[in-house]
Image (cartoon, rainbow, N blue to C red):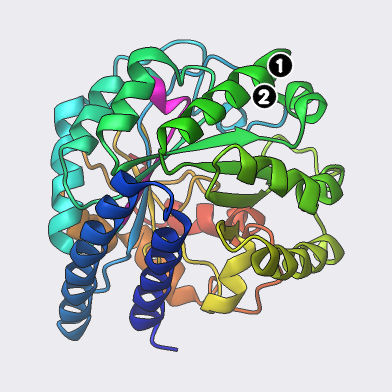
């Protein structure tokens, strides 16, 4: 498989589907058509780099905040001590994030997924992202702060795409995220729908909620509120509780349900992680398709594999892609083996730690 071409073609398909899904919103459709042209240029940059022997991934994941206002059950970020109740003074500055975003665009990166903690507690970083025109920033938020001036920010800057986390209906969401969380998220989604803002929903899929969140009734409710993008994120037991994690039977069922949903709801884009990686020859972490930058600038293979031998406080993205840790993971072949779902690097964290300890200290 020519991974670079396959990923670029997949991004092109995402934009075509996004344009179709935004037919009722003239401002959003205009932005997406313009952004599609920028993304073609990004694909050409990646192709040229590939010919020079440098693989540039089309995606980055940036955890821009350590602070979060919720205590969600099974949160991998809290389990990894990557987030807490208060901001950490050692976080990267907004100006440094802006430099990294601009560098990513120059390299040919198409999407930077902003996460946390809760990314909306860093409006200064969101403003830096908004200024990188043509770059798309899906912002994964719990939705509780998505109101007032924050909602206006997303309305003004269409390259910031809110992705609101829900676990199903009110009872399921509040059980995991806290009482009242669902109503705040639902209110934000309704308001975004009324403004014609292109937004998505992120659903953590477990054995318990799979039937509910993959049902036509649940997706129909999202569609009617204006949602045009659904991420199904498989639960990864970072806190050690493996019971809720989907098994192979659940992954196969989710894949079949998505086929049905894509046919029934053609105004919604459905993406699955890490399930969709099976079609891409394995895990995309460590720079094959993306890598993760933590709130302090450490370049990590993946949010679920929080190990780093490279700091981006002063370094650059191109050098990070060639880091010893990333190179060892890619050369080991562990990402390209038979992919049965779940998080490969999380499951093989002992091997990843061994790669790290044979090299330099973590960033």
- The residue at the point 34 percent across, 74 percent down is 8
Q: Nearer the viewer, residue 220 or 41?
A: 220
The magenta stretch is 111-120
Q: For the residue carrying disc 2, how many other residues have a C-alpha within 10 Å: few (<14), some (14-19), or many (20+)? A: some
Distance between mark 1 and mark 2 Cα atoms: 7 Å
- The residue at the point 26 percent across, 61 percent down is 33
Query: Where is residue 56, by image quadrant?
Result: bottom left
Q: Are marks 1 and 2 in contact (CB under 8 Å)?
A: yes
Which x, y percent locates residue 284?
A: 47, 66
Query: Where is residue 120, by image quadrant?
Result: top left
Q: Is residue 295 above or below residue 107?
A: above
Task: Label 2: state its secondary structure.
Answer: loop
Horizontal side, residue 186 vs residue 157: left or right: right
Count of numbered tags: 2
- The residue at the point 47 percent across, 41 percent down is 199
Q: Nearer the viewer, residue 69 or 145?
A: 145
Q: For the residue carrying disc 1, how many other residues have a C-alpha within 10 Å: few (<14), some (14-19), or many (20+)? A: some
Q: What residue is disc 2 on?
A: 72
Can residue 41 be spotted in the picture?
yes
Q: Is residue 19 magenta?
A: no
Q: Is residue 118 magenta?
A: yes
**Badge 1 or badge 2: first in the primary sequence:** 2
Q: What residue is disc 1 on?
A: 178
Which x, y percent locates residue 118?
A: 47, 25
Horizontal side, residue 123 vs residue 37: left or right: right
Q: Nearer the viewer, residue 214 or 312?
A: 214
Question: Could you say which disc has been placed on residue 261 in the image?
Answer: none
């Amino acid at each position: 498989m020519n991974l670079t071409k396959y990923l670029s073609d997949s991004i092109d398909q995402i934009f075509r589907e996004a344009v179709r899904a935004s037919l009722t919103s003239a401002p959003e459709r205009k932005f997406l058509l313009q952004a599609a042209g920028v993304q073609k240029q990004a694909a050409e940059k990646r192709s040229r780099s590939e010919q020079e022997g440098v693989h540039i991934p089309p995606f980055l994941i940036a955890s821009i905040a350590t602070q979060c206002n919720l205590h969600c059950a099974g949160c991998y970020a809290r389990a990894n001590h990557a987030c807490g109740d208060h901001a950490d003074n050692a976080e990267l500055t907004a100006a440094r994030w802006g430099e990294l975003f601009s560098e990513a665009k120059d390299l040919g990166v198409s999407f930077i997924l902003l996460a946390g903690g809760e990314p909306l507690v860093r409006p200064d970083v969101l403003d830096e992202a908004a200024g990188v025109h043509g770059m798309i920033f899906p912002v994964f938020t719990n939705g509780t702060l998505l109101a007032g001036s924050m909602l206006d920010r997303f309305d003004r800057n269409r390259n910031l795409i809110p992705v609101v986390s829900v676990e199903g209906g009110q009872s399921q969401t509040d059980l995991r995220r806290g009482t009242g969380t669902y109503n705040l998220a639902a209110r934000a989604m309704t308001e975004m729908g009324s403004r014609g803002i292109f937004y998505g929903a992120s659903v953590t899929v477990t054995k318990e909620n799979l039937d509910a969140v993959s049902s036509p009734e649940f997706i129909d409710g999202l569609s009617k509120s204006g949602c045009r993008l659904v991420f199904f994120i498989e639960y990864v037991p970072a806190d050690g509780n493996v019971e809720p994690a989907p098994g192979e039977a659940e992954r196969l069922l989710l894949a079949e349900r998505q086929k049905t949903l894509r046919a029934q709801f053609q105004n919604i884009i459905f993406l699955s992680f890490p399930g969709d990686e099976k079609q891409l020859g394995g895990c995309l972490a460590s720079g094959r398709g993306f890598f993760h930058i933590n709130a302090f600038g450490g370049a990590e293979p993946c949010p679920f594999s929080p190990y780093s031998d490279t700091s981006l406080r002063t370094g650059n993205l191109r050098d990070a892609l060639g880091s010893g840790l990333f190179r060892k993971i890619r050369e080991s072949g562990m990402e390209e083996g038979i992919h049965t779902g779940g998080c490969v690097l999380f499951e093989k964290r002992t091997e990843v730690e061994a790669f790290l300890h044979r090299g330099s200290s973590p960033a």
